[in-house]
């Protein structure tokens, strides 16, 4: 679900963390361990030799640790690749006009453009606009053949336009006179910020909406 948050800057923000692992140093330590183990065998008391299983256990322990370090290095490489992928996605989305699925929209006196998810096959659509007091201030039938719509702050009271604030949009769809779905409007926005939050790419827009990739689609307009 999209959220309305203030957008105060533009650009791309990514959050990554990594710890360097020096596998060459580890390899040198392993060689040193083998040398110490060899010296231990050569200098053991012939009358009280160490059990061979002790050497095997030491080797197994060190080998397991070496494998773990290599695995950590592989995971770091994967994390780096994911970070690079997110950067590529950021370059693809930044500055693009998009349709953001949102229940709420910030109105600041400028027309609010929106679309309806093209996946719905409907022949009638009704827009209902509700204010912060949960009062319906505007309702209208939308032209089902149109691709994009605009709300200019109209209210049922023609003498009192909507003030600046956050409003709830609900669109009820019908097909052949029967209710089809109640859905969110897809607010037309421009991507101004991006952030990597827990491995998930988040988009921020010029009208204060933030969403992940599941709640946005590119439009055909430039």
Image (cartoon, rainbow, N blue to C red):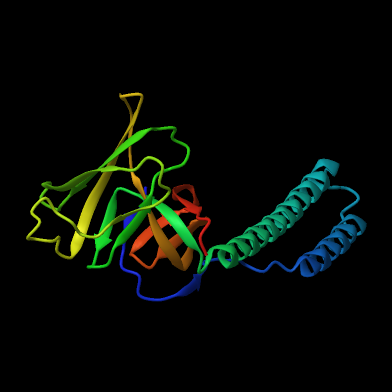
Horizontal side of 74 relative to 220 (left or right) equals right
Q: Between residue 14 and residue 39, name the one nearer to us.
A: 14
Residue 69 image point, x, y percent: 71, 57
> Residue 34 versus residue 44: which sits nearer the camera?
34
The x and y percentages for residue 42 are: 92, 58
Question: Compared with residue 144, is residue 181 higher up or lower down, i.e. above or below?
Answer: above
Is 51 drawn above or below residue 23 in the view shown? above
Indicate the position of residue 168 as horizontal and vertical percent values: 23, 49
- Measuring from the top left, give residue 155's x and y in whole percent: 14, 54
Quadrant position of residue 183: top left
How many dots with numbers? 0
**In this view, 121 is above or below 40:** above
Please give the name of the residue rendered at 26% of the width and 48% of the height, measured from the top-left corner.
169
* Left or right of 198, for residue 165: left
* Residue at x-position 87% and y-position 53%: 45
Q: In the picture, residue 111 is in which quadrant? A: bottom left
For the point 36% across and 53% down, the residue is: 114
Q: Is residue 76 left or right of residue 115?
A: right
- Say whether residue 118 is left or right of residue 49: left
């Amino acid at each position: 679900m999209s959220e309305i948050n203030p957008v105060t800057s533009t650009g791309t923000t990514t959050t990554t963390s990594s710890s360097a692992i020096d596998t060459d140093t580890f390899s040198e330590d392993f060689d040193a361990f083998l040398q110490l183990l060899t010296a231990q065998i050569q200098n053991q008391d012939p009358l009280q030799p160490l059990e061979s299983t002790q050497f095997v256990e030491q080797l197994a322990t060190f080998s397991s640790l070496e494998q773990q370090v290599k695995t950590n290095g592989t995971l770091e490489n994967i994390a780096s690749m994911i970070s690079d992928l997110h950067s590529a996605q950021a370059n693809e989305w930044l500055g693009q006009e998009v349709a953001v699925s949102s229940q709420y929209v910030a109105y600041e006196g400028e027309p609010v453009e929106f679309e309806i998810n093209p996946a719905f096959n409907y022949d009638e659509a009704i827009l209902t606009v509700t204010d912060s007091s949960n009062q319906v201030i505007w309702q209208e039938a939308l032209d089902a053949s149109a691709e994009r719509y605009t709300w200019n702050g109209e209210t049922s009271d023609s003498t009192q336009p909507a003030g600046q604030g956050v409003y709830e949009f609900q669109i009820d769809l019908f097909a052949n006179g029967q209710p089809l779905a109640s859905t969110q409007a897809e607010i037309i926005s421009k991507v101004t910020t991006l952030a990597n939050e827990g491995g998930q790419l988040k988009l921020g827009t010029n009208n204060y909406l933030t969403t992940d990739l599941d709640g946005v689609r590119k439009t055909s307009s430039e």
